[in-house]
C-alpha cells in the first residue's frame, strides 16, 4: 500500500526535509486538543501528508479510507453533517481531479464544514504530470462556497491551518512541506482569511504572489532595490475570498504589476487579479508569471521552476521589460 511505501518521500525535497519538523502535522495535533470535533481522513497517504502525527495521538479520530478519494469525500460529508470538522488529506492533484463531482455536490453545494488538505502543489514533485497539480486552484476557485488558502512557507503554516479550522464552511488548503526549518529568528506570519498581506513596500511596481512564489518575489524585490527600483511584494495567501480592495488600492500606487504563482496562469491568481483590475478600472502594465498553457515533466523542484519560469530571475526580467516600456 502507498501508506507503507511512503510515496510522498519521492518528492524533490524529500532528503533535505527529512529532519524538518512537520509543522502542519504538529499544528493539527494542537488544534485537535482544542477542538474535539476535529477528525482526520487520509487517502492512504498518511506520512506524506503529515497526518501520521494525528493518527498516533488520536487513533480513534483518524480514518484511512484507502485509495478511494471520491468515497473519502462522501465519508467526510457525512461526518460534517454529524457535527465533526473533517480534515481530508491526499495529494492536491488527486483531490481536485479524481473527486471533483463529489466535492462539488457533497461539500461545496451544501456548504459543509470540511477542510480539503492537498499536498504537492504545482511543480513540487519528481513524479511528473500524474502528480502535478497545476490547475487545482482554478478548479476549486470556480466552486461556489469554497475558500482557498495557501500559506507562503513554514512561517505561515500554523496560522493557515488555524484559520481553516475556525472558518465556517469548506476550505481548500494547498500545502507543501518546507525544505528548510524555522530558526529562532523567524517570527510566525499571521493569516486572516480574505485579507491580502503587504510584505514589502514600493512605488514602482508590485508583485502579487502565492505560496512558493512569495519567496521568489521577495528575492526579486531585494535585487531590484539595489538598482534603485522599488518593488512592493504582496502575499495573497487567500485566493478566495479574494481581497479585492487590497489589490485595487496597491495597484493604483504603482506603474507595473506582476502575478506569480506555482500554478497555471489560466484560472488562478493571475486570472483573479486581472479580473479585479479590469472591473476596478485600473489600467497598468501587467504580466502573469506561472506555468504556461502546458503540461510539465518530472524533475526536481529547482529544475522545474527554472525550466518553466517560476524564479526570481524571470520576475526581474519581466518587471524590467514592463518598466522599460513606458
Image (cartoon, grey):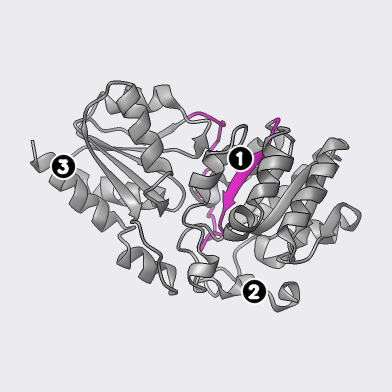
Q: CA distance from mark 2 to mark 1?
A: 27 Å
Residue 257 in picture, x, y percent from top left: 26, 37
The residue under the point 45% across, 63% down is: 123
| Residue 226 visible to the viewer | no
Q: Quadrant of residue 296?
A: bottom left
Which comes sooner in the sequence, label 2 or label 3? 2
Badges 2 and 1: C-beta atoms under 8 Å apart?
no
Crowd class of label 1 (few under 14; some 14 to 19; many from 20; radius 10 Å)? some
Q: Secondary structure at mark 3?
A: helix
Task: Farthest residue to the right: give it.
Answer: 60
User: Residue 188: where, in percent of width, then height?
Assistant: 55, 42
The tag on residue 322 is 3
Give the mark, 2 or 1, whose residue is nearer the N terminus: 2
- The residue under the point 47% across, 49% down is 211
Q: Earlier in the sequence, mark 3 or mark 1?
A: 1
The kind of secondary structure element at disc 2 is helix
Does the rendering let one see residue 39?
A: yes
Q: Is residue 197 left or right of residue 155?
A: left
**Dominant SS type (magenta):** loop
**Residue 89: x %, y % from top left:** 70, 56
Nearer to us in this view, 305 or 54: 305
Identify which residue is drawn at 40% across, 25% down.
Answer: 246
- Residue at 33% from the left image edge and 56% from the top image edge: 292
Q: Nearer the viewer, residue 282 or 56?
A: 282
Crowd rating for badge 2 (residues with CA inside 10 Å; few <14, some 14–19, many 20+): some
**Residue indicated by mark 1:** 159
Q: Which quarter shows the N terminus?
A: bottom right
37 and 19: which one is in front?
Answer: 37
- Quarter of the rendering occupied by the C terminus: top left
Span highlighted in magenta in the image = 168-195
Q: Secondary structure at mark 1?
A: helix
Which residue matches tag 2?
Answer: 7
Amino acid at each position: 500500500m502507498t501508506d507503507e511505501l511512503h510515496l510522498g518521500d519521492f518528492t524533490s525535497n524529500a532528503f533535505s526535509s527529512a529532519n524538518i519538523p512537520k509543522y502542519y502535522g504538529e499544528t493539527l495535533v494542537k488544534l485537535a486538543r482544542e477542538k474535539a470535533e476535529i477528525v482526520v481522513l487520509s487517502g492512504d497517504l498518511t506520512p506524506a501528508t503529515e497526518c501520521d502525527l494525528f493518527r498516533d495521538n488520536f487513533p480513534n479520530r483518524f480514518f484511512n479510507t484507502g485509495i478511494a478519494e471520491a468515497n473519502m469525500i462522501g465519508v467526510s460529508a457525512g461526518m460534517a453533517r454529524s457535527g465533526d470538522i473533517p480534515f481530508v488529506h491526499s495529494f492536491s492533484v488527486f483531490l481536485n481531479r479524481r473527486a471533483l463531482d463529489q466535492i462539488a455536490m457533497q461539500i461545496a453545494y451544501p456548504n459543509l464544514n470540511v477542510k480539503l488538505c492537498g499536498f504537492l502543489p504545482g511543480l513540487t514533485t519528481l513524479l511528473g504530470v500524474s502528480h502535478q497539480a497545476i490547475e487545482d486552484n482554478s478548479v476549486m476557485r470556480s466552486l461556489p462556497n469554497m475558500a482557498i488558502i495557501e500559506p507562503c512557507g513554514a512561517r505561515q503554516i500554523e496560522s493557515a491551518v488555524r484559520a481553516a479550522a475556525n472558518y465556517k464552511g469548506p476550505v481548500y488548503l494547498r500545502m507543501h512541506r518546507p525544505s528548510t526549518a524555522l530558526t529562532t529568528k523567524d517570527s510566525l506570519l499571521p493569516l486572516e482569511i480574505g485579507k491580502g498581506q503587504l510584505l514589502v513596500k514600493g512605488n514602482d511596481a508590485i508583485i502579487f504572489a502565492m505560496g512558493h512564489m512569495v519567496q521568489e518575489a521577495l528575492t526579486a524585490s531585494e535585487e531590484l532595490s539595489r538598482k534603485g527600483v522599488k518593488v512592493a511584494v504582496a502575499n495573497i495567501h487567500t485566493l478566495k475570498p479574494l481581497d479585492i480592495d487590497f489589490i485595487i488600492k496597491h495597484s493604483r500606487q504603482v506603474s507595473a504589476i506582476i502575478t506569480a504563482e506555482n500554478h497555471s496562469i489560466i484560472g488562478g491568481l493571475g486570472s483573479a487579479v486581472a479580473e479585479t483590475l479590469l472591473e476596478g478600472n485600473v489600467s497598468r502594465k501587467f504580466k502573469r508569471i506561472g506555468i504556461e498553457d502546458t503540461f510539465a515533466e518530472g524533475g526536481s523542484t529547482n529544475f522545474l521552476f527554472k525550466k518553466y519560469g517560476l524564479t526570481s530571475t524571470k520576475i526581474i526580467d519581466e518587471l524590467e521589460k514592463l518598466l522599460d516600456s513606458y
